[in-house]
Structure formats: structure tokens, C-alpha cells
Image (tube, rainbow, N blue to C red):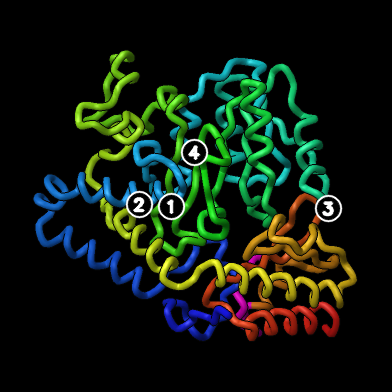
Amino acid sequence: MAISLKSEYLLDPDIIFLNHGSYGACPRSVFETYQNWQRELERNPVAFIGQRLPALMEDARCKLAAYLGVACQDVVYFTNPTTAFNMVLRSLELNPGDEVLTTDFEYPAMNQAWGYIAHKTGARYIHQSTPLPMFAQSDFTEAFWAGVTEKTRIIFLSHIAPFIAMILPIEEICKRARAAGILTIIDGAHAPSQLPLDLRKIDADIYIGACHKWLSAPKGTGFLYARPAVQTRLEPLVISMGWAREKPLRDAYAPDGRSWLVYFNEGQGTRDPSAFLTVPAAIEYQETRNWQAQRQRCHALAVETRRHINAFTGLPSLCPDSTEFFGQMVSVLLPETDLSMLSKRLFEEFKIVVPILTINEFRCIRLSFQAYNEQADADAVIQALEKILLRS
């Protein structure tokens, strides 16, 4: 039975941290590795960046690629998923009337970016309504696919929807889209480590993720995976020394043997690569601590906490308890109340850090359980909610 790793994280012991989903949290040993890379950089910046860095980045990228189940040349690091996503958006060739299909519960920053592209190109960004509560993943698939038309050029989906905290059936959607000739772009910010990933099996055209959330790497560690067949369509967001204007060059590997995806995006001016170089340490940290058992323990905490809250609110669950629908993060419905007051009281009176959200017509508390959380944390939020909602 897995036990809490609270003592191995750097979190303030005076707070109850149930918001790992927003920005993650880094274990002490991983953070120390991060700081060691920063010190190595500062000892001899010219030698580090000019001589050592290409091989170090190759190693860090290949270890991430192996973790994701894909080839080393098909993955590149970005500082966060938003930056990677903007690179993709700026590369798309969309025409007036083309349609991009998504759900009605995507991350606001991504919606903003799509809105910008739609305004610039005349394309339509369409939010397809899907059923909530969701009792079968096929319900989502059929409701979502009903929005596909002959004008649909791109499907954009979260792997784990950030606010409802539910796993979406992206593998089936990607399979249908490939058969229909529709490009798929998946926002996997919450998936790495919360789910065991095999991106080859998912078979999305483009998959964007974060290592700083559930993988517990340092902040500033996003990534982009692109199938080789679509890499020639992607232009760098930042034009730097590696850019080549001649399109025929895009069909071959770059002069140093890297893919053009990596060549264009890995060497973009002077920046601190320490967070990227620390990702292998984060992977190793979890591999040496039986992380599958931690996932199971945290999922069980999420299930039981939701059941207790539902018991005194009388509200239903948004989905079944199965790991098919959620992992270590769950959104629980709340009754009508002043949400800003609730959030304030949870922190000021009980030192609980947790997001309170409005998702369409639903009011929710999103609970994240990571390896540092314990039963006492779950009990604290249950008791605090009961006191505020029922006894105030």
C-alpha cells in the first residue's frame, strides 16, 4: 500500500494543498537537481551552452520521448503548453468558413488563442455541447462527433478536461478524425503522469503537454509531439539561427541530424535550459516510488472525498467512479452559494488551497490528490465544506 510522500515535497506544511492541477509541486530532490543544473550553467556559460548543451538536450528529450512512447525526434520542449500551442496555431493554414471543433469546457487561454486565429483567418471555432453528467464515454463521443461537418478541418480536445477534470475518449476521436482526414490537436496538460501515456496508441497528429503538473518537474517544462507526417506543416514561433527558408529542406533531416521540428525550436537564443534538463530526474523520481500505486491511492482518495461531499449536498456526480473517467483529480458539484466567499473562507479559516469553479451552469470544487496528500487532507476539506455550506 502506497504511503504519503508529503515529507519529500517543498510545500508549506501549514497549508492543505489540494490544487496540484494548476501549477504542480516539485519534490525536494528534483528541485535540487534543477538548481544543480543552474549552477553548472553559471560556472561556465560558454562551455555549457556552446559545447555541452546539444547533447544534454538530446538526452533529456529522448528520455521524455521514451516516457511518452514516441521517437526522440518527434518531441521538442517548450516552456509551457500555451507557447507550444501558439506555435502550432501560427502554422495552420485556415480559410474563411473552415471549422475547428472543440467542446464547451476547454481551457480559457486556448479558447482565446483560437478566437484570435478565427478572427485573423475567418475560420469558425465551434464549441460542441456534450452531456454532463457523463455516464459512458460513448455518450461523449457520439455527442461530440455530431458536430463534425464537411467543413471541419481541425478537432481540438483536452485529454483531461481541465475544469470538469474528466478523461475524454481522445483515442476514438483521433481514430475517426484520421479516417475523415481531419487534423487532431490534443491539449494534454494534465495527462503526463496522472495517466500512463502511449502517444503512439492515441495517434493524435499533435499532442501538447506539461511536465510541471503531475510529473512534478520544475515550472517551465512543456512539450510538443507531432507525427512526422505533419511536422513539415509546423513553422517555428521564434525565428532563430536554425530557420531555413527553402521548403525542400523541410523534407529531410536538419544538418546536425535532428528533425526540423527539433532543429527549429530547440535552439532559440539564450535561455535557461535547466528545467528541461531536470525532466529525466522527475521521471526517475516517480519510477523509483511505485507511482502506479500512488495513482491508485490518490484516485481512491478522490472517489471517497466526492462520495462524502455528495452525501451532504445531495448532488449527483458528474461521472462514475472508474479510472476510465478520472484519475487523481475530480470536480465535485456544489449547491448554490457565494463562491468567492467559499473560496475565501476555505483558505482563511482552514488553510485549504483549492479552486472553486463555474463550468457552464455547474458550480464545482476541483480536488487534486497527489503523492503528498493524506487522508487528513481529504477529511479537512470535507469537514470545512460541511461547516460552511450546512452550518453557516
| Cα–Cα span, label 4 and label 1 | 21 Å
- Residue type beneath disc 4: Phe
Q: Which residue is at a point 58% across and 27% down the rendered structure image? A: 183
Q: Amino acid at mark 2?
A: Lys
Q: Is residue 125 visible?
A: no
Residue corresponding to mark 1: 67
Q: Dot 2 corresponds to which residue?
A: 63
Q: Quadrant of residue 391?
A: bottom right
Vertical position of residue 2 compared to residue 279: above or below: below
Q: Secondary structure at mark 3?
A: loop
Which portion, as a residue range, is magenta? 347-355
Residue beneath disc 3? 135
Asked if the residue under mark 2 is in contact with the one under mark 1, i.e. CB atoms within 8 Å, the reply is: yes
Residue 297 can be seen in this image: yes
Q: Residues within 10 Å of mark 4 (few under 14, many from 20)?
A: many
Q: Which mark is residue 85?
A: 4
Closer to the eye: label 4 or 1: 1
**Which numbered marker is on residue 95?**
none
Q: Amino acid at mark 3?
A: Phe
Q: Nearer the viewer, mark 1 or mark 3?
A: 1
Q: Nearer the viewer, residue 83 or 170?
A: 170
Q: Nearer the viewer, residue 339 or 85?
A: 85
- Residue 194 pos. (x, y %): 56, 60
